[in-house]
């Protein structure tokens, strides 16, 4: 934990589980050799290992737990094992250098926001005969058509293009509405207008009415604040 000079680890073959937070914030760690019989990587085990670029996991692993590789911002490659069953909440959170991921057939439980913040992840390979997931038009969805990850949305949210010539604290020409919904675990989860309507959370007509109310309330608040000299 926080061994910031540690750059290489070779784990013993007898090890079957990496406990929670063991290598948390080992920011110089660049190489790990995992044992062949490892079964589980615990919560935040490699949290914020910011120099880690490649992870080759043994096929014996069945679970990558909560925030296991969260904040590994230099990670460009991670091999998901052939026996992996569960990818935990925020497991790859803000692995913002990761561009491609391949899902094994065994992976049937991707927890909420497991891929959140992977802003460069533009391609996910899913076997045609996968029992739970498929990847269509930049969207990873499950067998119930529930959205798991939307590559285009992630990139747009992280890279909003601001109008030319804007300065700090300048008002946008019009408010930007960024809806969220409550995640199954942990934090709120980003969701787009299209996803809200597609999932039947509200109808298109109701969403547009709510959007109109939101803009009206914001405008009224802006006018009151301006009169009070607050903005």
Image (cartoon, rainbow, N blue to C red):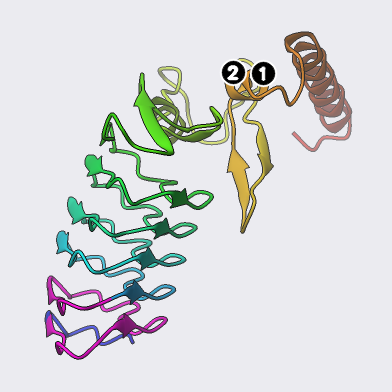
Image position, residue 75 (x, y; %): 21, 56
Mark 2 residue element: helix
Q: Position of residue 164 (x, y in %)?
A: 40, 17
- Whole-angstrom CA distance, mark 2 to mark 1, is 5 Å
The quarter of the displayed image where residue 6 is located: bottom left
Q: Nearer the viewer, residue 168 or 185?
A: 185
Picture residue at 24% right of the left edge, 46% below the top: 98
Q: Position of residue 48 (x, y in %)?
A: 33, 68
Q: Is residue 126 left or right of residue 162?
A: left
User: Answer yes or no: do the residues labelled 2 and 1 have beta carbons within 8 Å?
Assistant: yes
- Residue 133 % position (x, y): 41, 36
Q: Which residue is mark 1?
A: 197
Q: Which residue is mark 2?
A: 194
Q: Residue at x 31, y 72 (%)?
A: 46
Quarter of the figure that contains the C terminus:
top right
Residue 222 is left or right of residue 118, and the answer is right
How packed mark 2 is, by other alpha carbons closer than 10 Å (few <14, some 14-19, many 20 or more), is few
The disc placed on residue 64 is none
Residue under the point 44% across and 73% down:
43
Secondary structure, mark 1, is helix
In the image, is residue 200 above or below residue 107? above
Is 35 covered by the magenta stretch? yes
Q: Which residues are magenta?
A: 9-38
Placement of 176 over or under 59, stated as above or below: above
Disc 1 crowd rating (10 Å Cα; few below 14, some 14-19, many 20+) is some
- Rendered position, 134 above or below 52: above
- Is residue 177 on the magenta stretch? no
At x 44% / y 46%, what residue is drawn?
116
């Amino acid at each position: 934990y926080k061994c910031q000079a540690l750059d290489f680890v070779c784990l013993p073959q007898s090890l079957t589980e990496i406990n929670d937070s063991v290598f948390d914030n080992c920011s110089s760690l660049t190489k790990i050799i995992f044992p062949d019989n490892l079964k589980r990587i615990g919560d935040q085990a490699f949290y914020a290992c910011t120099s880690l670029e490649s992870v080759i996991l043994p096929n014996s692993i069945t679970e990558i737990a909560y925030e296991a590789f969260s904040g590994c911002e230099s990670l460009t490659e991670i091999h998901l094992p052939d026996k992996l069953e569960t990818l935990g909440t925020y497991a790859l959170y803000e692995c913002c250098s990761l561009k491609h991921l391949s899902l094994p057939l065994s992976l049937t439980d991707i927890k909420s926001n497991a891929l959140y913040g992977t802003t460069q992840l533009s391609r996910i390979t899913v076997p045609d005969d996968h029992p739970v997931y498929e990847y269509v038009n930049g969207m990873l969805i499950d067998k119930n058509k529930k959205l798991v990850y939307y590559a285009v949305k992630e990139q747009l949210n992280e890279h909003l293009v601001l109008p030319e010539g804007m300065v700090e604290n300048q008002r946008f020409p019009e408010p930007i509405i960024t809806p969220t919904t409550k995640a199954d675990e942990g934090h709120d989860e980003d969701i787009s207008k299209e996803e809200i309507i597609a999932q039947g959370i509200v109808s298109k007509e109701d969403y547009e009415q709510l959007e109109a109310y939101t803009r009206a309330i914001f405008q009224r608040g802006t006018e009151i604040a301006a009169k009070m000299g607050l903005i």
